[in-house]
Image: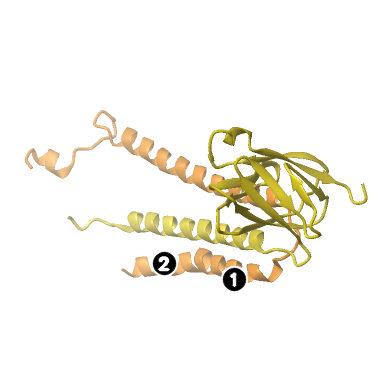
Chain colours: A orange, B yellow
Amino acid sequence: MKVIIGLGVVLALLVVIPSVQYVLAAGDSTGEYLDRRVVIWGLFYRLMIVAFTVGTVVSGLIVWLVLRFRESNPKAKPTSYEAAGSW
Amino acid sequence: MSGHSTWPEWVYVGVVVALLCYVGAEAWNIERIVEHVPEDAEIIKVTGQQWIWTFEHEDGTKEIGELHVERGKAYKFEITSKDVIHSFNIHDYVVLLDAVPGRVNTVWFSPTEAGEFDIQCREYCGLIHYNMRGTLIVEDKGA
């Protein structure tokens, strides 16, 4: 539980609190001329980077899991149930 | 369940929550900035009807199918419809908003380049929807 709380605090400090501050501070500089194309497409590309990064990590992890823990992998070890021969 | 370690799962949950916070905050922030209209923006009333766009400037000038604006100036569109739902789109300037009967929707933009740009209905509105087009003509000041 301590680890979970610690992790939560670290994430809050690193990501959540700066995000909230960033958003709340945004209202100060609005109402000015801007190029919608730059702003909106910029947002799109940033979020696409997030999406593709997550997709790469998740799919890479799945591929690694499937290859690493397949039965035919030379490094595979029997589970405790398999080693005992009964389950 | 055996007493195996669950920290990888919690790390995974934490990363997902952090990413969602980032995505939400970023999108919210941009939406706020984009929606805030400059004070000196000129209001243009945009009316969609099967199957033409009509425009009315602040000085009362009306245009049908063509819209003349000045480069570098801000314009606020007040968009409505006379019949069915349409959608007002200037693709090159990322302007896209529904025109709904009985309702006025607003969006603003500031053209940065002189030239001609397509205006197009983006909500299927009947037989001639495909040809419910217009032209945005951006002119340099004094031209």
Q: Residue at x 36, y 39 (%)?
A: A62
Name the residue that disc number 1 marks. A24
1 or 2: tag closer to the N-terminus? 2
Residue type (three-letter) at the residue carrying disc 1 = Leu
The outermost residue toward the right is B142
Q: Chain of mark 2?
A: A
Residue type (three-letter) at the residue carrying disc 2 = Gly
Find residue B76 and name its label.
Answer: none
Q: Is A4 displayed left or right of B137 in the figure?
A: left
Callout 1 crowding tier (Cα within 10 Å): few <14, some 14–19, many ≥20: few
Name the residue that disc number 2 marks. A8
In the rendered image, the vertical position of residue B63 relative to residue B22, given as above or below: above
Q: Residue A78, located in which quarter of the rendered image?
A: top left
Q: Secondary structure at mark 1?
A: helix
Which percent across, then down, holds residue B98? 57, 50
Q: Nearer the viewer, residue A81 or B52?
A: B52
In the rendered image, the vertical position of residue B140 relative to residue A11, given as above or below: above
Q: Residue at x 47, y 46 (%)?
A: A54
Q: Residue A67, located in which quarter of the rendered image?
A: top left
